Image (spheres, rainbow, N blue to C red):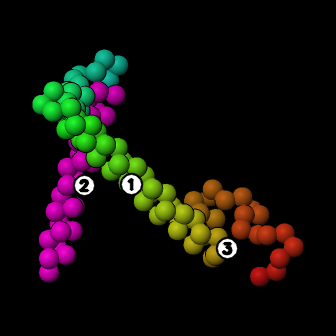
Amino acid sequence: MLGFYVLGVMAVVALALSLMWVVHIIIYLLPPRPLGAFLNTFFVTLDGVFPLFGVLAFSLFCLYFMVVAMKGNFMMGKLWDLGLRMGKKVDGLLPATAGKVHGCKR
């Protein structure tokens, strides 16, 4: 039962980190002139409190972003592999000879 609570807390933390990244992209990166320095100000403020806090917060955000990107790549790889095994094109991205090894019979 404790595992469900741990997964629930992790899901809430992941949701908060994802929303903060999306808000930062919308506020800081999309407009021609940034509307504000959302996460930049957050990291600098934490760095002013104690230098290690800013570094740890930035590391947490970067690690989370990397893990999410890897998870997405693995999921796409599974879909790609499933399409190859079924002999179908996955979203029209595979060339006609994809999945065939020359000289080998299946």
Discs 1/3, front? 1
Q: Is residue 38 visible?
A: no
* Real-space Cα separation, disc 2 to disc 3, in angstroms: 36 Å
Residue under pointer 2: 14
The kind of residue tagged 2 is Ala
Discs 2/3, front? 2
Q: Position of residue 63 (x, y in %)?
A: 35, 48
Chain-order first, disc 2 or disc 1: 2
Residue beneath the point at 34% across and 28% down: 30
Q: Could you say whether the residue bearing mark 3 is in a helix, strand or loop?
A: loop
Residue under pointer 1: 67
Is residue 22 rendered magenta in the image?
A: yes
Picture layout, residue 96 above or below residue 20: below
Numbered range of the magenta stretch: 1-30
Residue beneath the point at 31% across and 34% down: 25
The kind of residue tagged 3 is Gly
Residue beneath the point at 25% across and 28% down: 40
Quadrant of the rendering where the N terminus is positioned:
bottom left
Residue beneath the point at 29% across and 27% down: 28
Q: Position of residue 52 (x, y in %)?
A: 22, 37
